[in-house]
Image (cartoon, helix red, strand yellow):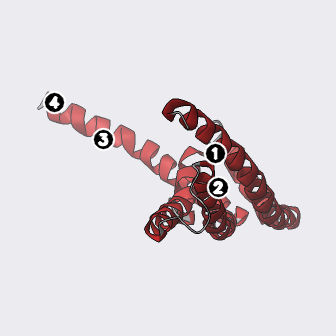
Amino acid sequence: MKVVALCLAAAFACTPALANEAQRQETIARIVEAQGLQDMFQQQIDVSRASAVEMGQRTFKKILLEAGVPEGKEDPRLAEIFGRYVERCATMFTAKELVSTWAGAYGKGLSDSELKQILAHYRSPLGKKDVQASQVAMASFAKTMLVESEKRVNDSVVQLMSEIKAVVGK
């Protein structure tokens, strides 16, 4: 009987903590919505997906050229395989998955009161302007990072092929 009473007492003691956590997660969900994170992540995914396919095609050609395969002599099946690979890489995560992961990590060091203040900020006229500015910045940021990524991938491919050639003796 004592065990049952202890279990009931523990269950009742946890109920307010679970309710507080549910309220906290609801506040975070509202912050995520107010910030427009899903739209921003989707915007980045859309820009990345389109650019990744083009960049993948150029990278594939660079790999073949560095490997000594003359232009026009590549096996089209390899290009198709590489294209599918790049497409899979470009769509590894959905905006919903990114938002869910971000929301799960957000606010760990913030009190419930601070979360409510943050939500109030994003719902205010200034907060809405902040969200709009972030969305505009994300488009520019994503494009800039893609251009820089392609430069770095190209440099990396040259280095990779140089090291492979050194090992295989070409």
Element type at mark 3? helix
Of the pair 74 and 134, the residue shown nearer to us? 74
Q: Residues within 10 Å of mark 4 (few under 14, many from 20)?
A: few
Identify the residue under disc 4. Answer: 3
Q: As shown in the figure, which amino acid type bears the numbered disc 2?
A: Lys
Sequence-wise, the earlier of marks 4 and 1 is 4
> Of the residues tagged 2 and 3, which is closer to the observer?
2
> Residue furthest toward the left?
1
Of the pair 16 and 101, the residue shown nearer to us? 101
Q: As shown in the figure, which amino acid type bears the numbered disc 3?
A: Ala
| Marks 1/3: CA–CA distance | 58 Å
> Of the residues tagged 1 and 3, which is closer to the observer?
1
Sequence-wise, the earlier of marks 2 and 1 is 2
Sequence-wise, the earlier of marks 1 and 3 is 3
Identify the residue under disc 1. Answer: 157
| Marks 4/1: CA–CA distance | 65 Å
| Marks 2/4: CA–CA distance | 70 Å
Q: Quadrant of the C terminus?
A: top right
- Place of residue 119 in the rendered image (x, y in percent of width and height, measured from the top left): 72, 57
- Place of residue 142 in the rendered image (x, y in percent of width and height, measured from the top left): 75, 60
Look at the numbered discs 2 and 3 and tell me whether their residues touch, using CB distance below 8 Å.
no
Identify the residue under disc 3. Answer: 11
Element type at mark 4? helix
Element type at mark 2? helix
Element type at mark 1? helix
User: Residue 62: which disc?
Assistant: 2
